[in-house]
Image (spheres, helix red, strand yellow):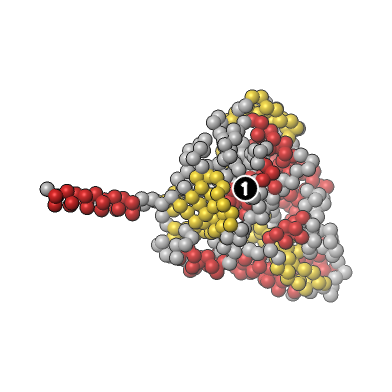
């Protein structure tokens, strides 16, 4: 009998050990190339902020899904008036912020009024320009009245810049973000990692993961060994040049999708000699997109001729407007009185697409007499010098915000572009909900930007994701700048 009990006990322990061994993991380490400057999506332009916090920690009235669709979020439903100017949002009940404070319509009003205020530091303040009035009907109902109907309003409310924050924590979200999402902030080890943990009091469907660490890996060469060793299990945005080192390995999924990342050679349009149309057009003719795509994105980027993703139904292919033509470029510089060329600076932020692309573009422009001094800068410097102070000649960056053609109409934007005809089209677009008319206006806007050679349109940034083959739920495409972990889980 004692022997039988011993055998039975051993069998139970063996079964328990086996069950534990095959239980799905609930932790995840994700590699990201850039550290956010802070952790408040409503107060910064850096994509790295949303890549950590969007849908995970912070939520909005609506949210953008993996296919770019508008989904309900904190608002469970809404009604739109016949004139398209009034939106009545019905909010979920039982929602709490991570500090335990309750969520209500008052928080929606506070957040959107804060975002559109005169002293707002929201990087996408234009999203809220059409809001005329916000009324709290009751704790779970908020009514938003627009100055004019706006076809993109529900989509705009799904941006990271439009997430809802609490008045109690709004001023401290940069260091200690407090939202309503399924994950709550645990720790930020500056220069190393940001850790989120599952919220036990989440109002919606619980997430599968208990803990997520966003590990900051700025060196692309370090990503491969970290992945191969299992130290990091996923890189949603992987260096294209490193794909060959993991492709074909059954331990990993290599997924190549699309983004909203228009990669451009940005030009300071008011700084001589770039204020001359012929100079900007000469630069566009000098650019060899294929060489840039091959060298900076391992051949995976898709050429663009305007500021819109080729995956967008309203995209107009204008890549043929400026074919690679050195003779034409030199001719235009001669017309501009710059036959002997000139010197300028090219400020490059850290991503490999910028640093690698910058070397190629400097070589190409040298062929037409433009001698570029390459100035590498960190993201904080880029945001301060280029984006904020407009202290630059040329720079390379991917604009990963969705449907952001309207940025070219902003008078304080770093392009320093000013064209009343373009502004008029954007103003009409903001008042138009008819899809056929919107498509027509978007086509006109793209054509103006291309004709004016406002920037050098290069390619659409590919989304190259590499992660453990047992992971499910990570996004294949990037319709917005996000790493939405709400559906991510490990399989057996």
User: As drawn, which residue projects farthest toward the top?
Assistant: 138
| Front in this rendered view, residue 353 or 167 | 167
At which x and y percent is residue 472?
44, 51
Mark 1 is surrounded, within 10 Å at the Cα level, by few (under 14), some (14 to 19) or many (20 or more) other residues, namely some
**On the picture, is 19 further left or further right than 298?**
left
**On the picture, is 192 further left or further right than 247?**
right
Where is residue 82, by image quadrant?
top right
**On the picture, is 185 further left or further right than 421?**
left
User: As drawn, which residue projects farthest toward the front?
Assistant: 2
Which residue is at a point 26% across and 51% down the rendered structure image? 13
At which x and y percent is residue 23?
36, 50
| Front in this rendered view, residue 464 or 61 | 61
Residue 302 appears in the picture as rendered? no
Which residue is at a point 73% across and 32% down the rendered structure image? 146
Residue 459 appears in the picture as rendered? yes
Q: How many marks?
A: 1
Residue matched to label 1 = 176
At which x and y percent is residue 61?
61, 36
Which residue is at a point 82% across and 72% down the rendered structure image? 342
User: As drawn, which residue projects farthest toward the left?
Assistant: 1
| Front in this rendered view, residue 476 or 111 | 111
Which residue is at a point 77% across and 52% down the rendered structure image? 413
Is 176 drawn above or below residue 331 in the view shown? above
**On the picture, is 249 further left or further right than 89?**
left
């Amino acid at each position: 009998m004692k022997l039988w009990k011993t055998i039975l006990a051993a069998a139970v322990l063996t079964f328990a050990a086996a069950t534990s061994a095959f239980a799905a993991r609930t932790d995840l380490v994700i590699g990201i190339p850039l550290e956010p400057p802070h952790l408040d999506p409503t107060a910064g332009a850096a994509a790295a902020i949303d890549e950590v916090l969007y849908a995970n920690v912070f939520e909005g009235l609506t949210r953008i899904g993996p296919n770019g669709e508008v989904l309900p979020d904190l608002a469970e439903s809404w009604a739109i008036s016949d004139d398209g100017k009034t939106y009545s949002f019905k909010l979920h009940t039982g929602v709490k912020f991570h500090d335990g404070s309750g969520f209500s319509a008052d928080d929606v009003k506070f957040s959107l009024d804060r975002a559109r205020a005169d002293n707002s530091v929201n990087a996408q303040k234009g999203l809220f320009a059409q809001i005329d009035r916000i009324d709290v009907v009751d704790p779970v109902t908020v009514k938003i009245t627009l100055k004019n109907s706006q076809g993109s309003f529900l989509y705009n409310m799904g941006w990271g810049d439009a997430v809802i924050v609490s008045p109690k924590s709004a001023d401290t979200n940069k260091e200690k973000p407090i939202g309503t999402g399924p994950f709550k902030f645990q720790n930020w080890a500056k220069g190393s990692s940001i850790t989120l943990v599952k919220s036990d009091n989440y109002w919606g469907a619980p997430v599968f993961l208990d803990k997520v660490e966003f590990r900051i890996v700025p060196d692309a060469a370090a990503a491969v060994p970290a992945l191969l060793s299992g130290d990091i299990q996923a890189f949603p945005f992987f260096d294209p040049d490193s794909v060959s080192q993991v492709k074909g390995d059954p331990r990993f999924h290599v997924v190549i999708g699309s983004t909203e990342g228009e990669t451009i050679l940005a030009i300071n349009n008011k700084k001589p000699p770039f204020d001359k149309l012929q100079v900007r057009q000469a630069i566009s003719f000098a650019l060899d997109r294929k060489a840039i795509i091959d060298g900076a994105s391992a051949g995976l980027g898709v050429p663009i001729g305007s500021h819109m993703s080729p995956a967008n139904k309203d995209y107009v292919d204008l890549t043929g407007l400026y074919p690679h033509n050195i003779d034409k470029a030199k001719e235009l510089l001669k017309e501009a009185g710059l036959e002997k060329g000139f010197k300028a600076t090219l400020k490059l932020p850290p991503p490999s697409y910028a640093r690698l692309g910058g070397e190629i573009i400097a070589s190409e422009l040298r062929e037409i007499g433009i001698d570029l001094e390459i100035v590498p800068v960190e993201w904080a410097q880029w945001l301060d010098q280029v984006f904020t102070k407009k202290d630059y000649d040329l720079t390379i960056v991917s604009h990963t915000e969705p449907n952001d053609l309207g940025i070219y109409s902003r008078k304080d934007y770093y392009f320093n572009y000013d064209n009343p005809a373009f502004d008029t089209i954007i103003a009409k677009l903001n008042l138009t909900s008819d899809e056929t008319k919107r498509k027509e206006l978007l086509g006109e806007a793209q054509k103006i930007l291309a004709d004016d050679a406002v920037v050098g349109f290069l390619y659409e940034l590919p989304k190259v994701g590499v992660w453990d083959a047992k992971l499910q739920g990570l996004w294949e495409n990037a319709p917005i700048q996000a790493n939405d972990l709400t559906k991510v889980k490990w399989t057996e």
